[in-house]
Image (cartoon, rainbow, N blue to C red):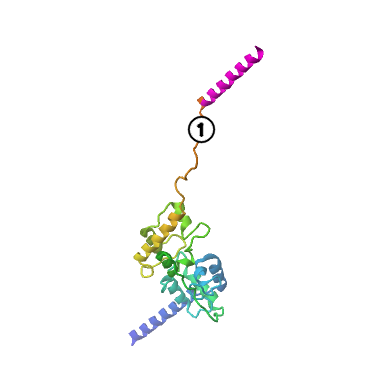
Amino acid sequence: MTHVRRFFILGLAVAVLTGLSVTEALAQDPDTGKVVFEEQVWQCQRCHGPEGEGLWGRPLVGSEKTAQEWIEQVRTPARFMPSFSAEQVSDQQIIDMHAYFSALPKPADFTPQMPPEFDHPGQTLMAEKRCIACHTTEVQNGEGPMITRLIDRGATPTTEVVLTQLRTPFKNMPSFRADQVSEDEAAVIADYLTQVVSSQTAPAELPQSGRVRPAATPALWVLLGGGLLLAGLVLHRRIHS
């Protein structure tokens, strides 16, 4: 009986301590959550809308999910949503955003943005995988998806380069699992990006029209000067003869 009592007391203590730690971890600040969404984790707006009203992804406003479910979705998301690391957005920031959006009224109706189809299958894949939310799929103002950085680095978007960026992205981009974007799909996307990069990269040497005159050499200037001096002497003799 003593052992049962000790076990019960130990279990109760663990439950109390766990409850205290969860309560502390789930301290929510909706005002901070608004700032985080609008100014810090800007990627969320690209899919969920600037007001959390929904766009490519579902609305955040009026969410009925718990803060823990939000954390799980951000770390190991379902379907098309890429995952964010703790360095990109912390659990506390997710909790604060959850507090902000869950207190707002749920939209009466929502129709998600549907990805268009393009001539190149890689471009269509970028739309289907929601890459279109952050990366344009058409050349606009001389720029296309990832165009500027790729050209500046002189990089060719091979399948390996695209896969590396998808699995272990640089800086702000979230990551995509193999079940979200396969290696074969990455190869198709890489082929499309290669075409875009090639079309936007200027040739090493621009063609020149007309004949290029060689720069005048010092010897040529001396010859011209001597000729002018001789002509002047001849003219002077004729005038005074």
Magenta: predominant secondary structure element?
Answer: helix
Residue 232 lies within the magenta run:
yes
The residue tagged 1 is 215
In the displayed structure, would residue 34 be above or below residue 210?
Answer: below
Q: Is residue 121 left or right of residue 105?
A: left
In the displayed structure, would residue 240 be above or below residue 164?
Answer: above
Disc 1 secondary structure class: loop
In the displayed structure, would residue 61 be above or below residue 229?
Answer: below
**x, y percent for residue 91:** 47, 70
* Magenta-colored span: 220-241
**x, y percent for residue 106:** 54, 80
Q: Nearer the viewer, residue 231 or 5?
A: 231
Residue 116 lies within the magenta run:
no
User: Is residue 213 among the parts visible in the rendering?
Assistant: yes
**x, y percent for residue 51:** 56, 72
Q: Quadrant of the N terminus?
A: bottom left
Q: Quadrant of the C terminus?
A: top right
Q: Quadrant of residue 198?
A: bottom left
Q: Nearer the viewer, residue 111 or 219?
A: 219
- How many marks the image carries: the answer is 1
